Image: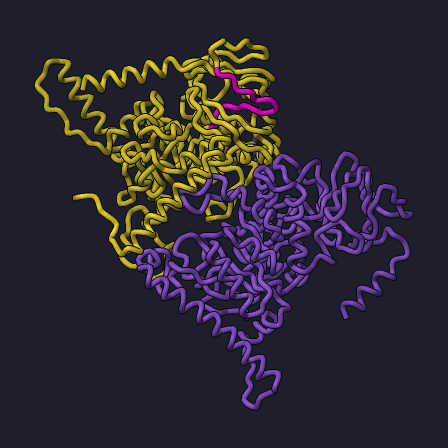
Chain colours: A purple, B yellow
Amino acid sequence: MKWIALAVFSVAPLTWADDATTFLIRGATVHPVASPEIDNGSVLVRDGKIVGIGRNLTAPKGIKIIEAKGLHVYPGMIDSGTQMGLSEIESTRESVDTGELGKYTPQLRAEIAINPDSEHISVTRVNGITSVISLPLSGGGEGGGRRGTPPPSTIAGQAALVHLDGWTWEDMDIKKSAGMALRMPIVAAPGGRGGGPDAAARLTYSDAKKNYDADLRDLHEFFQQVRRYQKAKTANEKDFHPDLKMEAMLPVIEGKEPLIVFATRERAIRDAVQFADQEKVHAIIANPRELGKMGPELKARNIPAILGPTLDLPLRDDDPYDAAYTLPSQFFKAGVKFAFGSFDNQFSRDLPYQAATAVAFGLPYEEALKAVTLNAAQIWGVADKTGSIEEGKWADLMITDGDPLEAKTQVKQIFIKGKNIDLDNKQKRLYEKYLGRP
Amino acid sequence: MKKLCIVAGAFVAAALAAPPVVIQNATILTVTKGTLNGSILIRDGKIADVAEHLTAPTDAQVIDASGQFVMPGIIDCHSHIAADSINEGSVSVSAMVGIEDVLNPGDIAIYRALAGGVTTANILHGSANAIGGKCTVVKLRWGKDAHDMIFQGAMPGIKFALGENPKRAGNPTGQRIGAQNVNYRYPATRMGVEDVIREAFTEAKAYQQSWKDYNDKVARGEAAIEPRRDLRLEPLVEVLEGKRFVHAHCYRADEILMLLRVADEFGFKIRTLQHVLEGYKVAKEIAEHGAGASTFSDWWAYKLEAFDAIPYNAALMMRKGVLVSLNSDSAELMRHLNDEAAKTMKYGGLNETEALSLITINPAKQLAIDNHVGSIEVGKDADLAIFDKHPLSNFAKVEKVYIDGELYFDRNKDLAERTAQEAEKKKLLDKEKDLLRRNAPARRPAA
């Protein structure tokens, strides 16, 4: 139905000027990411989609023209790990919806809890971030705050890929179930039994190991249960009862939806790879803090990664001081595809600087830019729609006065699906209000 | 003992005899005297000359910094690294404790901060109570002992804290549900926080008077009994007498204004407001009081009182006449304060020099150490950070860091030593494995 409506609409306008999402940007340096940059280039957008890029595009008659001489056009950036719309004030429980009670809650959908009026959305997008992955994460229903974080769930629910614009979460939707969030069991974690980091500290190694083994067994058992459910459903067995948890897992075991596997250390990454092999699922490693010897393993299986903040401390006291800074270049050298995620709403707008620091410590610049644009779109399976400036994709764009990976650069305009987005937000309003205070 | 003195004497002599260093062909960001391409001469730990053309003394060690940028060592006005403990939160006024007593020169965070270009930091007590413990300004002299890290001559400080943190212990709703053994501690509201500070200074004034009375009597030759020393009130008397700086953790405009008025009432000054995320709302009052502001570049929304934080805060307060610095409050953020400074160019349109001043000369002024550090000027300590690119570029990294003319961080040296360190670590791990394999318990030192 939607498709039909769109088709009719795209035929309807008689002139190019009718629609606010139809325009020509010209005179800019265009950075398509998927292809070399174009000086004095133009981008032609019709009905929110890119229909032309190049040096000598003729402006169709009557079209709105955006003069961008001396400016740059980049694809909008994608933050591949946030809690956008789910968490407003980290330490205020009532404003946080990131973690539900229960160890296995795959039926939970982040998208339906995204508050489209979250102040984080307008604050983040003015820095050129036009879409984000929003993830359920910690368990326990007590908020994702730093204090008193309850034991994490193992499978927390479905992550959504959304645009940072829309009247409702349905408007924002790019992909409802972009991935299933799984936290790989680890040794020394409370494993859902003790509760809190203090409990973990009290565990002996053998107890922690026992918990870990049990958690891993549980996880495999859960997947076996899903397979039995799938079999029963397919066979239309007499006693078959629908189960929402099982239903939510079907796309995962069918390879249609990736598992977003949170794995910090090398050992957890190894476990994740082994798990993906055994359960024949499509995995994405999330927020790893080291690569160790896992590069070839990930590369051989085409398992991509979402790298967390580059600006982070090393894991161990005796790690090189720049361990986190060089992690992206280690992944690059190993041939593992990756994108960046901030994993923290308040720093989502700093996503490009995460990429820049990686460049300072060895990552080629083009790879850093891809890791906040095209790579992310490819990893999330939406590279036909966004992530670069190419014909046929949405006009998710930003116009800047320089390199978006540099903090001093100003983002002049952003477009989401061709819509010129208001750059106003709470912080600008407060700034202007108090700038004017006598 | 004698031998020890001789050794020490020889050491001092050797240090004094250290050859001069010339850093040449660099872009020098002096912060206070403009930017030039040229050289810096370091002699006896001080900046002896800064010039476009400079003839290196024949005995000088010459560092070629072609294409590189030298800036003053970064100063962090709010850090908690290098300390074994941070909060004495059992009481609402813990002025008797101090960070100096728990400095840990072995904290790896010191080296990591050096590798981010930081040379000086104000190490603060935590924010658990309205009046916290005493603070210490240190230079990040990695490898030296705790005493040798202390910035000699820096004004002593004390930490105050307003808002959510000090009232949490009185109203622990933010804690985990079912948390056992909660000890409620006054205050539980911002009203109570004000009261704690006013009560403390009322006591301090009386204590100050008791000493004045005693000293007056002694001066008159009258018999007098010395008042009992009160280690909790002594630092507050120092505050009243302008001998100790107040560094006050605060967020909301109301509590900022409250503290300024309490200080006015008791006749002392707030040296710096720390975090001060709503400082932009009362910038006029802050400037009038003469308090400095030390804030974050763009942190917000991590707690309710940080929800009106704006990344324009530093720039706006600066425009309204407040002396502003950017701090870290974090061992991680501390490593890239130059990146944080760059954000003020985006948010609020500061120029390069203004942005750099936020992490150099301004915090130096706030800590009253600006006659020693904070800019590249002849006569100041040779505390310098050399970057491979302009430090306000997010693509820049630190190559070398000098404190008192001594090289404390060198990226090339760090890289070169990694192989040997890996080998050493492996050897130690192998040894441990070997011991375990032989089922022999690791030998413990004799009790």
Above/below status of A64 relative to B317? below
Q: Looking at this view, is A202 or B228 the one in front?
A: A202
Asked whether, in this view, residue B361 is left or right of residue A353, the answer is left
**Splitting the image into 4 quarters, where does residue B128 fall?**
top left
Q: Looking at this view, is B71 or B238 the one in front?
A: B71
Q: Give the range drawn in magenta.
A: B61-74
Rendered residue at 74%/58% (across/down) = A384
Q: Looking at this view, is B288 or B233 the one in front?
A: B233
**Splitting the image into 4 quarters, where does residue A368 fall?**
top right
Query: Looking at the picture, how far across and down is residue A80, in whole percent?
Result: 60, 54
Q: Looking at this view, is A273 or A414 the one in front?
A: A273
Rendered residue at 51%/76% (across/down) = A224
Asked whether, in this view, residue A295 is left or right of residue B94, the answer is right
Q: Quadrant where the C terminus of chain B lies? A: top left
User: Going by the picture, which residue comes out furthest to the bottom?
Assistant: A238
Residue B408 lies in the magenta-colored region: no
